[in-house]
Every structure is written in structure tokens, then in C-alpha cells.
Amino acid sequence: MAMTSPSSPTPTEDYLALVRRKRLYGAILVALFVVLMASGFNLAEGRNAGGFFEGLHRIFDFPAEIFSEAFTNWRNMPAHLVSFLPSLLETLNIAAVSTLIGAVLGMFLAFLSTRGLAKWPALIPVFRRSMDIMRAVPEIVIALVLIFLLGVGPVPAMIAIAFHTTGALGKLFSEAAENVDFKPVEGLASVGGSWLQRVWFGVVPQVAPNWSSYALLRFEINIRASAILGFVGAGGIGYDLKTALQWGMGKYDQVVVIFALLFITIMIVDHMSDRARERLVKGGQIA
């Protein structure tokens, strides 16, 4: 039996050394982060027209001006609620269509980039890098390019959000598919099942709850994204909000109504999708 050398570190010493190294690396990363934040703040402060701390006491001046005017013109708000409903529906349609398209395309990319399921294993890195590119490009950048090519309207917003959603959901779908039980897939292969049959009957039933949960969560995110893209001319209620803010005084009651509509809509969708995700993943009942 081999004897341990007296000079060899014990397992406890190895563990303590590993902990010290992790703490050292963590301290270095925190220090680097603080330095970068401080230098970035100083750079931004130098480029501002005014100072951050000098203007900090006025941070609530603009919101106070908006709400005071809205309080004065509160009688106009019910009419504004009705007038902005079509724009809100357009925003919801943009989010729903882009989520559906992104989920379908993400599903195909997930199957093509999942180890053990890919039809062309050699192309897995290609599909994975494609999804990385889709996630890396912000929706607003894609929308600005498409608005230049196609003009203002909801179509550029839908394409931009669907492009980003494809990359995001494709990544999540692929991770879920990699953790499935491959015994049904192997059983289907043993009886001559095609690649599509193995995927559809062996994998989809296992991942459907998680995939549906991810898609619902992405729908919530896309509602916010479609509202933001309205600021660059991509239609929806965001465009109405931009117009009201640009007019300034005299339109602030409309700004409050639009914010209220967005807040209520997002709150309702978040609540409904949370309950639906809970039922899909955990098998609970929606109250």
C-alpha cells in the first residue's frame, strides 16, 4: 500500500487552498467591476450637459408636471382610454405574432442544434452560433434597419422581435431537449422511425410543458419590446406615447393614460402567464 508523503497536502488543505483562490478571483473581479463603473460614470459625467449630482434634486420635476396636468384634465381620460385601445391591440398583436414565429423557428433550430438529436451533427456549431447572433443583436437595431427599408409600421417591429425571439427561445428549447430521456428516441429508432418521427413522438411530449412555459415568458417580454419599438416608428401604443411626449404640455394626460394601459395590460398578462406556466410545469389548476 502506497504511503502518503509527509509533504503532500491533505484533502482539507487542498480544499482551503481552492476556497482561497476562489475568494481571490472574486475579489479581483469585484475590484475590476468597481473600477470600470467608476471610470464609466466619470466619462458619462464629463459628457453630460449638466452634472448628475447637481441635477439629482430635480429628478421628480418632470413626473410631477405630467401628473399635475393629468389631474387637471382628468375628465378627458375615459375618452383617451377608448381612443388608445386600438394601438394597444396592435402592440399585443405584434408581440403575439412575433412570439409565435420565434417559437416555431426556435423549435426547429433547437432540434438541429441539440446533441443526440441533430439531423446533421456536424452543423451543430453553425446553428448554435446563428442563435448567438440572433440573441446578440438588439431588437431596436434590427427595427431601425427595417424601418429604413420598409418604412414605419408594425411589420418591422414584428420581424425584429421575431428574429431576437428565435435566438432566445432556440437556446432555451435546446437546453431543455438535451435533458430528455432518450430511451423513447432509441426505441423509435430501433423500429425504423424516421428522424422526424423520433423527434415528434419521442422528444416533443417530454419538452412541451417547459417549451410552452418559455414561450409564455417570452410573450411577456415581447409586449414590453413592442411598446419600446414604437418609439422608433414601429407602430403600436409606443408610437402614440412618443407622439404625446413630443407634444409636451397639453398632452400629458394622454401620457398618463398610455402608461396606465401598458401597466394594467402587462400586469394582467404576467399574472395569467404565471398561472399558466405553473399549471404546465407543475400540473396545478388555474384558479
Image: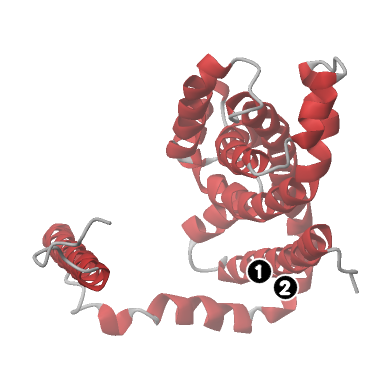
Q: Secondary structure at mark 2?
A: helix
Q: Position of residue 69 (x, y in %)?
A: 55, 79
Q: Position of residue 207 (x, y in %)?
A: 75, 44
Residue at (14, 57) in percent of width and height: 47
Whole-angstrom CA distance, mark 2 to mark 1, is 15 Å
Q: Is residue 121 visible?
A: yes
Q: How many marks?
A: 2
Amino acid at pointer 1: Phe
Q: Position of residue 59 (x, y in %)?
A: 35, 78
Using a 10 Å C-alpha cutoff, classify the residue at mark 2 as few (fewer than 14 neighbours), some (14 to 19) or many (20 or more).
Answer: some
Residue at (57, 65) in percent of width and height: 251
Q: Earlier in the sequence, mark 2 or mark 1?
A: 2
Q: Position of residue 216 (x, y in %)?
A: 73, 52
Residue 101 numbered mark, or none? none
Residue at (78, 30) in percent of width and height: 185
Residue 18 or residue 227, whichever sits in front: 18
Residue 151 or residue 155, whichever sits in front: 155
Where on the picture, by quarter, is residue 16? Answer: bottom left
- 115 lies above or below 252: above
Looking at the image, residue 116 sits to the left or right of residue 198; the answer is left
Where on the picture, by quarter, is residue 28? Answer: bottom left
- 102 lies above or below 41: above
Using a 10 Å C-alpha cutoff, classify the residue at mark 1 as few (fewer than 14 neighbours), some (14 to 19) or many (20 or more).
Answer: few
Reading the image, the residue beneath label 1 is: 263
Residue at (65, 50) in percent of width and height: 218
Residue 77 numbered mark, or none? 2
Residue 32 or residue 236, whichever sits in front: 32
Q: Secondary structure at mark 1?
A: helix
